[in-house]
Structure formats: structure tokens, C-alpha cells
Amino acid sequence: MNTRISMLIAPCIKASTREGDIVLDTFAGSGTTCKLAQELGRKWIGIELNPDYAKIIDEQTKQQNLF
């Protein structure tokens, strides 16, 4: 995960959500926002049309349960 991008995204997640909230990423790409949300104690929903990227997201996050 790119640390520069993480430094930009993490404050946005922290400022707009609380732990346990859900973060929606409608263009999930490689899953950076999803992974950060998970690390910050948020649940997440990532939408990605490319199955190759969806596999990367799955490998990076290994999210157990949504609720």
C-alpha cells in the first residue's frame, strides 16, 4: 500500500466516520481505502468491476464479517 496515498486518505476516514461505521468506496481499485478503513476499525463496502482488482482487495483485507 502506498504510504503517501494512505496519509491522504486516513484523515478523511477519521474525520468523517467513527469506529464501527461503514466506509463506502464505489471505485475500490486495489483496495487502499478498504484496507485503511479496516485498519482504523471501520467496516467497509468496496465496489470494483474488474475481477483482477477484486481479487487483490480480497487478498489485502480478508474482511471477516460486514455486521
Image (spheres, rainbow, N blue to C red):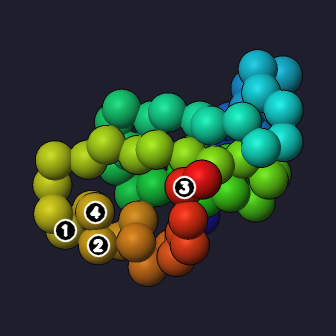
Q: Secondary structure at mark 1?
A: helix
Assess whether mark 3 and mark 4 are in contact (beta carbons under 8 angstroms): no
Is 17 situated above or below 6? above
Callout 1 environment at 10 Å: few (<14), some (14 to 19), or many (20+)? few
Q: Which residue is mark 1?
A: 52
The residue at 19%/68% (across/down) is: 52
Distance between mark 2 and mark 3 Cα atoms = 18 Å
Q: Secondary structure at mark 2?
A: helix
Q: Which residue is mark 2?
A: 55
Q: Which residue is mark 4?
A: 54
The residue at 39%/57% (across/down) is: 30
The residue at 43%/79% (across/down) is: 59
- In the image, 13 versus 64, the foreground residue is 64
Distance between mark 3 and mark 1 Cα atoms = 22 Å
Q: Earlier in the sequence, mark 3 or mark 1?
A: 1
The residue at 46%/44% (across/down) is: 45
Q: Which mark is residue 66?
A: 3
Q: Earlier in the sequence, mark 2 or mark 3?
A: 2
Distance between mark 4 and mark 2 Cα atoms = 4 Å
Assess whether mark 2 and mark 1 are in contact (beta carbons under 8 angstroms): yes
Residue 54 visible, this angle: yes
Distance between mark 4 and mark 3 Cα atoms = 17 Å
- In the image, 41 versus 1, the foreground residue is 41
Is 33 situated above or below 26? below
Horizontal placement of 1 versus 39: left or right? left
Quadrant of the frame with the N terminus: bottom right
- Identity, as a three-letter code, of the amino acid under mark 4: Ala
Assess whether mark 2 and mark 4 are in contact (beta carbons under 8 angstroms): yes
